[in-house]
Image (cartoon, rainbow, N blue to C red):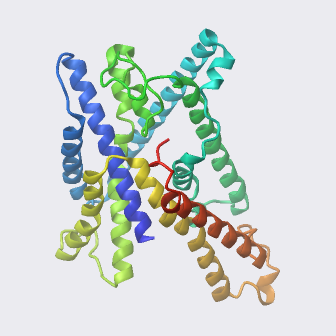
Amino acid sequence: IVSFTYGTAAALAVMVNESAAHTICSAYLLYKPDGTCDEDVMYKYCVCGTFLITLPMCFGDLQKTKNFTYVIMTARFIAVVLMVTISSMRSYHRFQEEGAAQVLSTVKLWETDQFMAVFGNGVFLFAIHHYLPSMISPLEPQRKAPQVIATAFGISYVLILIVSATAMVAWGGEALECSQHPGGHFCQVQPLYNLNFVPLGWFGGSMAIFIASYPSMAIVNIPIAAITTRNTMAQWLGITLSGAENPYTFTNICMTLVVLVPPSVVALITKNVQVVIAYVGGYAGLTTAVLCPLVVLVKCRELLSLDEGELQVLRRPLKSAFGNKKGYTFVCLMYALALILVTKKLFIDPKAPAPHP
């Protein structure tokens, strides 16, 4: 769990800072078309700046930033809608100009070398089983919780399918890399998909800058990930942290730095967010999302004696359909199969390239 939360923070740091560096360079080149902007140097500045911004936020009361979080969530939703709309329009124009056969010939429907890119992102997107108890416990009536979960997952899956399908069609046959400034040439799907929209010239380039900044809005999630990791590690090590009324104690500061510094160091070392996602999602994420809930389920059922006496026949609206030996066996087999495939792709198969979309 600690490894997964560390990895999540590292992936967030890479994604936020790469997006911020592109956004700043795009804005600068829009203001000064003849100028130059070194994105690698800007990226390192952004990593340092993000660290200095998020560090004090880890000692504050995040409940007071709830309204700001709502604004960020709304802006991110608008950015996703814009990306889907623009890519759908480009897909339509490609079908009209090139014909369906030509367009579909550029779409790669199956490429095994990119297994880890898809698998790692899939873990981060859908393997959230360890969050479900806290998500559904406040729901009333609880008998509708399975329907709510199925609806939420269904909507997410359809949205991701639309984004992926329109992306493959809209940007097929383009150059490998996009222009840095609005009004330039487009490119194939990038490791951060929002970067495909940097050359967009709508509204004088302001639309491109807004979409390019979309992942950097996740900076509000870095303190949450850091606080979660800090509290988990403190509980694991038996360390007592002071409350919100006295956050700047020596223990709090040291634990926060222990949690916040490593993801920033990872961000300084690599800009390839897909590599981070592949390794973290393929091992720590998979274990946290699949194996840990199974262990908790079995242990809690034993402690509560749910398989004995009157509780055995009690009707429970949130009873797991996998809460039996067949379910346990199936989950363990799928977990083992996934680990084998992940290890093969990351370490055994020498022909597999570094993960990218």
- Seen in the picture, residue 64 relative to 203 is either above or below; the reply is below
Q: Is residue 41 above or below residue 107?
A: below
Which residue corresponds to the image point at 52% horizontal and 68% vertical from the top-left? 288
Relative to 259, residue 25 above or below: above
Furthest-right residue in view? 313
Left or right: residue 44 compared with residue 232: left
Quadrant including the N terminus: bottom left
Q: How many marks?
A: 0
Residue at image coords 63%, 10%: 96
Rendering coords of residue 148 (x, y %): 67, 52
Q: Residue 74: image x %, image y %?
A: 45, 37
Q: Is residue 334 above or below residue 117?
A: below
Q: Image quarter for residue 169?
A: top right
Q: 119 or 162: nearer the eye?
A: 119
Q: Nearer the viewer, residue 23 or 130?
A: 23
The single residue placed furthest to the top in the displayed view is 97
Q: Is residue 246 visible?
A: no
Q: Is residue 298 found left or right of 346 in the rendered image?
A: right
Residue 91: image location, x then y, percent = 58, 20
> Viewer-proximal residue, 7 or 72?
7
Tell me the quarter of the picture where residue 280 sits: bottom left
Q: Residue at coordinates 29% horizontally, 32% vertically from top-left?
A: 23
- Can residue 5 be seen? yes
Question: Residue at position x 35%, y 15% from top?
Answer: 183
Where residue 220 sits in the image (x, y, percent)?
34, 49
Q: Is residue 40 left or right of residue 324?
A: left
